[in-house]
Amino acid sequence: MDEKSSVVPTRHIVSAFDEQLDILHELIREMGRVAVRQITEAVTAMTERDGDLATAVMARDSVLDDLERKVEAQTMRLLVLRHPKANDLRDVIAAMRIANNLERIGDFASNVAKRTMVLQTLPEVALARSMRPIARSVADMLELVMQAYDEADDTKALAVRDKDEEVDRAYTALFRELLTYMMEGPVRITACTHLLFAAKNLERIGDHATNIAETLCYRVQGQPLDAARAKGDDTAAVTVMPA
Amino acid sequence: MDEKSSVVPTRHIVSAFDEQLDILHELIREMGRVAVRQITEAVTAMTERDGDLATAVMARDSVLDDLERKVEAQTMRLLVLRHPKANDLRDVIAAMRIANNLERIGDFASNVAKRTMVLQTLPEVALARSMRPIARSVADMLELVMQAYDEADDTKALAVRDKDEEVDRAYTALFRELLTYMMEGPVRITACTHLLFAAKNLERIGDHATNIAETLCYRVQGQPLDAARAKGDDTAAVTVMPA
């Protein structure tokens, strides 16, 4: 637990370090599994108007918060006791960043679940079903990037980045549809506004999966990607007028 | 630039470390100044319908991105060359987290500016002016937390947390007003939707200022705060019906 580790044989240090690193990796993998489940169940709750499932998703958010705290504690332990360098340092720092992204993804999924509770009390909007393919896309992105994490595969990580553009396009299309639908009947405005924010949450989940992909490339390649990727959605420029 | 630093006298090491830490602190302070300016100018652009100012805000977002990259590089340098422990390690890790929050704040301000461009092309909504007090509150929160950072003052940081509840209340009130206003005329729906998202961006800036406050408390006190604080806004549960 102190600087004495520098006098024990090298192989011993490496293996102790690797063991500690494995614990860190497994925490990240576990966060990834929980986050994918949260996305899927939050959108199922929303489209099925299932309040019990929404409540379960909201309650489970604390699991991700706890796991992120464990990642932080493990990161600090590794930095203090092992002062890693080069690849190993990038691995540790990447884990901290990825845990932060996964925790945020959990918050977005939880917010979708929270909006399910109020949508249940409002007239059903058929467009809610359009959330499903977007949710499936972002859950797929997250699964793919977690697989890339597991295999330290930066090519796979880059494929996730490309998928984010599809998600942005689907979100922009849904945004326009929801605005049009609101214009057709003021009674739908509250429900559609919650759907707009829920769709935005899914789009943000896609952004965070992309952030994880970029962190992974940095971890594997040793330098940050150029910032050329189109960032965020295009709905900030959308106008729709009543017919 | 290598492990030889461990053979030079202690006072020399400490002072070199402190110098490197000062560079890190100054980068964070600079990010804080830019972020406050971005919030203020983004909302001025929106309320004054000033497209040139909005364009300037969007262009300046890259300054925060560059500063965050510098913070990361400086953090890695400190971790590799100085392997800090206890207080010093918390200081370095806190800087990395705070830089991430400030970069996100910049993204939210930039998104407000982006929405200004489309709002300019739509009929003016008087409610847009209600953004100003919320923007002033979150800019104040950020200034206060950056002052707390400068003085390593955790009491001041906690005061920022309390202010976030006011911001959430003001945001929820504006959210209701905007929904009501949309119900009164479908022609306002597009503009009001952009205002809803702009207001949400400001509310999120408040959350990030609060995150900075919490990171600061962790840096000063050496342990994370309990998670008892009410998190996020209450609008996920809001319903408004047409009159």
Image (cartoon, coloured by chain):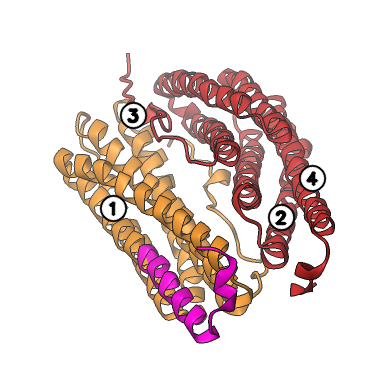
Chain colours: A orange, B red
Quarter of the figure with the N terminus of chain B: bottom right
The residue lying toward the viewer, choosing from A93 and A183, is A93
Distance from disc 4 to disc 1, alpha carbons, whole Å, reads: 39 Å
Q: Is residue A158 above or below residue B220?
A: below
Instruction: Count residues near mark 2 (Cα–Cα under 10 Å), then give few for <14, some for 14-19, many for 20+.
Output: many
Q: Which mark is residue B205?
A: none
Mark 2 against mark 1, which lies toward the viewer?
A: 2
The residue lying toward the viewer, choosing from A28 and A238, is A28
Three-letter amino acid code at the position of disc 2: Val
**Residue A13 image point, x, y percent:** 51, 78
**Residue A96 image point, x, y percent:** 50, 59
Query: Do callouts 3 and 1 mark residues in contact (Cβ within 8 Å)?
Result: no
Q: Which mark is residue B71?
A: 2
Query: Do callouts 4 and 1 mark residues in contact (Cβ within 8 Å)?
Result: no
Q: Quadrant of residue A141?
A: bottom left
Q: Which residue is disc 1 drawn over?
A: A38
Q: Are marks 4 and 3 on the same chain?
A: no
Mark 4 against mark 1, which lies toward the viewer?
A: 4
Q: Which residue is disc 4 drawn over?
A: B26
Region rendered in magenta: A1-28
The chain carrying label 2 is B
Query: Do callouts 4 and 3 mark residues in contact (Cβ within 8 Å)?
Result: no
Q: Which residue is disc 3 drawn over?
A: A190
**Residue B2 image point, x, y percent:** 77, 74
Distance from disc 2 to disc 3, alpha carbons, whole Å, reads: 42 Å
